[in-house]
Image: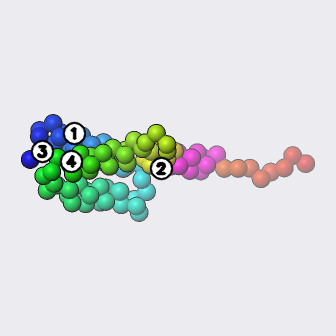
């Protein structure tokens, strides 16, 4: 049985990933995948398995020391695309 602290940690992780999922394209279905992943793991009872699942969620959120977090990379890509739409390149020459 998971402790109350573990349950609160899982809920906080879900809420944070759900908030970060707003930056994904709708066609990716981030919220649906997130929900299915948490529902799949809802019946875990072994403390080691629960900790492993939480570490995986935190990896998705934060990445690790050798790479950029996936959510941050997608957020930066979205920001870049928005700026590219706002400031199109001019093909007018000076001559």
Residue 75 shown left or right of residue 81 in the figure: left
Say if mark 1 contacts mark 2, CB within 8 Å.
Answer: no
Mark 2 or 4: in front is 4
Q: Secondary structure at mark 3?
A: loop
Q: Position of residue 41 (x, y in %)?
A: 20, 56
Identify the residue position indicated by label 1 in the image.
Answer: 9
Residue 33's image quarter? Answer: bottom left
Identify the residue position indicated by label 4 in the image.
Answer: 48
What residue is drawn where x is 43% and y is 42%?
64
Q: Which disc number belongs to residue 74?
A: 2
Residue 86 shown left or right of residue 61 in the figure: right
Residue 8 position (above or below residue 26):
above
What residue is drawn where x is 9% and y is 47%?
1
Identify the residue position indicated by label 3 in the image.
Answer: 2
- From which residue to which does the magenta span run? 77-87
| CA distance for labels 3 and 2 | 33 Å
Q: Is residue 7 magenta?
A: no
Q: Position of residue 29 (x, y in %)?
A: 36, 60
For marks 3 and 4 on the same chain, the one whose residue lies earlier in the sequence:
3
For marks 1 and 4 on the same chain, the one whose residue lies earlier in the sequence:
1
| CA distance for labels 1 and 2 | 24 Å
Q: Residue furthest bottom?
A: 27
Mark 1 or 4: in front is 4
Mark 3 or 2: in front is 3
């Amino acid at each position: 049985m998971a402790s109350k602290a573990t349950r609160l940690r899982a809920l906080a992780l879900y809420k944070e990933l759900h908030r970060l999922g707003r930056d994904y394209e709708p066609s990716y279905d981030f919220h649906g995948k997130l929900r299915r992943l948490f529902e799949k793991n809802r019946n875990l009872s072994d403390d080691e398995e629960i900790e492993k699942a939480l570490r995986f969620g935190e990896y998705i959120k934060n990445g690790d020391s050798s790479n950029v977090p996936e959510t941050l990379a997608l957020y930066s890509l979205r920001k870049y695309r928005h700026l590219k739409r706002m400031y199109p390149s001019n093909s007018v020459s000076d001559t």
